[in-house]
Image: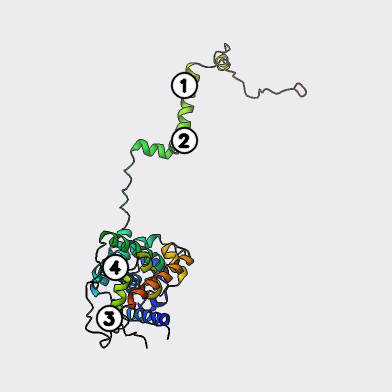
Amino acid sequence: MPLDAMSDISDDALLVLFANGDRLAARALTLRLTPRVLNHAYRMLGNAAEAEDVAQEAMLRLWKIAPDWRQGEALVTTWLYRVVANLCTDRLRQARPVTLEATAEPVDPAQGPVARLQGADQEKALQQALARLPDRQRQAIVLRHMDDLGNPQIAEIMGLSVEAVESLLARGKRALSADLIDRREELGFADE
Amino acid sequence: MSRDQDDIRALDACFEAARAAPLEPSPELLARVLADADAEYARTAMPPARVQPLPRAGRLRQAIRTLGGWPAMGGLAAATVAGIWIGLSPPEGVQAYLSQPDAAYIVDLPPGVGFDLTEGTL
């Protein structure tokens, strides 16, 4: 079966195909899921090299579980995000001080409102603000606003009720706003 | 525009900027992930260890198998022991039968003579 034809096949069906020796299924899953786990890990850790390690380890665990995967019971992505979260938590515990590559980068106060930050700078500012959030709030925010998951799936990934997820998201967004508010002008959102 | 709305707009713009610039997995990472998949598949799909052929059966084993295996041999052994036991120490009824004093008669009958029974004697 050509790789393109696999785009319509669900993750768990691909996983079963892989367990049965279909190398193309492994390739399709790699291309489909590695970017997701990599970016989730990056948003959680703020370090691209560590995120790569976590992504590889999470995918390896996926290959290992493939022969025992029970199709239809859970979403592969739910399982995978849970694995990534655990791996990130372990790393954050091991290296609590400065994990962000970008946090040390100072903002030049001389730039002022004239040199408003856009695009990549907004992304960088967000990443710095995310790093200052408590782990659970950060995880909920990343799953909701970066990975674009629904609250029920986030609740399943985090082992919480949907209400608890909503509460985490609300607190996380408030904290992010408060963090970014001082940089409103740099970010190009000065009061109009 | 209210301050709160402005905050939400700023935050949403940051989320959008972050989503628009995802970290792309390097070809090396993808290659490592695929190599892991291959290695894991090779590990779990290893052919089962070669089955050792059964050792060639000896003559006794072949004979036992011909007779029906150990259950049949058990019955045969029990019958043999019972026969020997009866031979060495016969029960009373058998003893009486074996030690009958009367010898067997040899009757030489001329042709034409028979043991015809008269009708009505039995």
Q: Residue at x 32, y 85 (%)?
A: A188
Q: Name the subunit of mark 4.
A: A
Q: Position of residue A172 (x, y in %)?
A: 39, 70
Disc sitting over residue A121 in the figure? 3
Q: Secondary structure at mark 4?
A: helix
Placement of A175 over or under B66, stated as above or below: below
Marks 1 and 3 belong to one chain: no
Mark 1 crowd level (few <14, some 14–19, many ≥20, 10 Å Cα): few
Q: Position of residue A5 (x, y in %)?
A: 39, 78
Q: Name the subunit of mark 3.
A: A
Q: B99 or A4, which lies in front?
A: A4
Quickly name the residue at label 2. B72
Q: B34 or A42, which lies in front?
A: A42
Quickly name the residue at label 4. A45
* Apparent side of residue A153 relative to residue A100 in the rendered image (left or right): right
Task: Tell which tag, 3 or 2, sits nearer the viewer.
Answer: 3
- Mark 3–mark 2 CB contact (< 8 Å): no
Q: Secondary structure at mark 2?
A: helix
Q: Position of residue A15 (x, y in %)?
A: 38, 67
Q: Residue at x 52, y 17 (%)?
A: B90
Disc 2 residue type? Ala
Task: Say whether residue B69 is visible.
Answer: yes
Q: CA distance from mark 3 to mark 2?
A: 89 Å
